[in-house]
Amino acid sequence: MAALEFPRGFRWGTATASYQVEGAVSEDGRGESIWDRFSHTPGKTANGDTGDIACDEYHRYPEDIEHMKRLGVSSYRFSIAWPRIFPTGRGQPNLKGLDYYRRLVDALRAVAIEPVATLYHWDLPQALQEKGGWANRDTAHWFAEYADYVMRKLSGPVSLWITQNEPWVVAFLGHFYGEHAPGLRDPRAAFAVAHHLLLSHGLAVEAFREEHLAGRIGITLNIQLVHPASASPADQAASRLADGALNRWFLDPIFRGCYPEDVVALVQSQGWMPNIGSGDMATIQRPIDFLGVNYYTRTLIAADPSQPLGVRPLPGPGAKTQMGWEVYPEGLYEVLTRLYKEYQPQLKQLYITENGAAYDDHLPVPVELVNDDTTVHDPERVEYLGRHFYQAWRAIQDGVPLAGYFVWALLDNFEWALGYTRRFGLLYVDYPTQRRVWKQSAHFYQKVIAANAIDSSYGEERPASDRKP
């Protein structure tokens, strides 16, 4: 089969997030986060799992950088834990926390891996939650102070900044459905949180521009592809509204300076509309250098007046990952081309900042027998990645300015409320020993990076059992 080449200089990377991998939650002055509090609350996470140790990345990052070097990645996306820098969210910075990230980015640069830093990946200092958290407008300004400090201190080694990761998840899984920290079920608070997260993003972009810092800045959104469950007018309308609540509620303010009218009408009718201050929308619309896209699956939407927004998500008919998410690679092409078509010229550049799959991976031998040649077999993940890489290549051929692809995740890790019951990593982690073991998908990714190309067979529809990694 033909090798389909990606553009020269295309960034191949991988990603993690602070609370999911770092551990060391009480070391070197780090403060408590909302995920520390949430995960230690009985019944909130699977098996009562916490991020207390996680992958012990705080101590093991040199080892993991060696794995990245072997993979051949050109970029590594990680997040900075706000409570490591400001243990109570504000006040005097914790220099030991800052020094950890200095050591990390210097070690990455030493092996020619570009550090890509996310300023917020959900671990809000608990002290700020006690002041109202993201539902308190002041938190947007406190975030901007934190972001300004970190960007100034790490500017240079870090040339690519992401302000917020998946604000929809923070706002709605954390405050509407209560499945994530801080575990609230308050629709009005959820929409206020969404607005304040967007405001915090805009304020951080303003700080970045005013400081004349080197590098580029953007935001990462989880773009949730929605299709109507049927051709009925009701399902078609419900799908459009779901897209508005999931996607356009965040995209339109960033690129158009306004919230989508159809969702505004619904939110106002429910009494959930957030207070929007004078100048807020102009701040949120400050030009960004790139948009990060996290894509995993699609959702079918049916009309259901009994639901809070009048919509009901249904699983698609295709094969599922262990998360129960339909494997739908074509959706990545649809998302990328749609974004560029609808939001240019404001949208200048795109990155896939997360894409990956959870499967039920197992060591092939007891951990005491693991050696450097041991490989965890995960052919489903190889197939998943290959098919998504093909769709990314296809989008580039159609003019989408896609500059990089970050596979989620480098390591198996703490999967939020699901604890350690799901594995997304290219590297298997045996948590009792912290042994890292390469998976078949890591070897596959290594070959893709080395070739800067994907085999054209991944554009064909045929069973995974017929595919050679």
Image (spheres, rainbow, N blue to C red):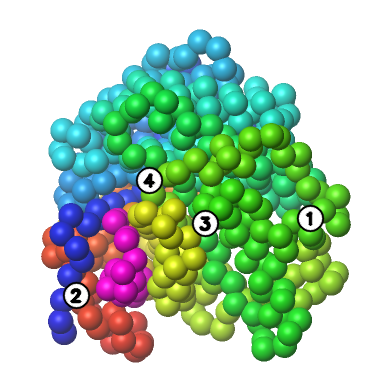
Q: Is residue 244 above or below residue 89?
A: below
Task: Please name the residue that numbered disc 2 is placed on.
Answer: 4
Q: Which residue is mark 3?
A: 222
The numbered mark, 3 or 2, whose residue comes first in the sequence reads 2
Look at label 3 and name its amino acid: Asn
Alpha-carbon span between mark 2 and mark 4: 27 Å
Q: Specify few, some or many for label 4: CA neighbours under 10 Å numbering under 14, 14-19, or 20 or more.
A: some
Q: Earlier in the sequence, mark 1 or mark 4?
A: 1
Name which residue type carries label 4. Asp
Inspect this view and state whether residue 147 appears.
Answer: yes
Amino acid type for the residue under numbered disc 2 = Leu
Residue 256 in the image, given as x and y percentages of width and height: 56, 53
Magenta segment: does it hold 390?
Answer: yes
Say which of marks 3 and 1 sits in front.
1
| Foreground pick, 405 / 407 | 405
Residue 357 x/y as whole percent: 43, 64
Considering depth in this image, is 356 or 426 the residue closer to the camera?
356
Q: Secondary structure at mark 4?
A: loop
Callout 1–callout 4 Cβ contact below 8 Å: no
Report the magenta residues as a range.
386-404
Quick one: label 2 or label 1, which is nearer the N terminus?
Answer: 2
The CA distance from mark 3 to mark 4 is 18 Å
Answer yes or no: is residue 426 visible: no
The image shows residue 466 at horizontal and vertical percentages of: 28, 87
Residue 267 image label: 1
Residue type, mark 1 in image: Val
Residue hosting label 4: 289
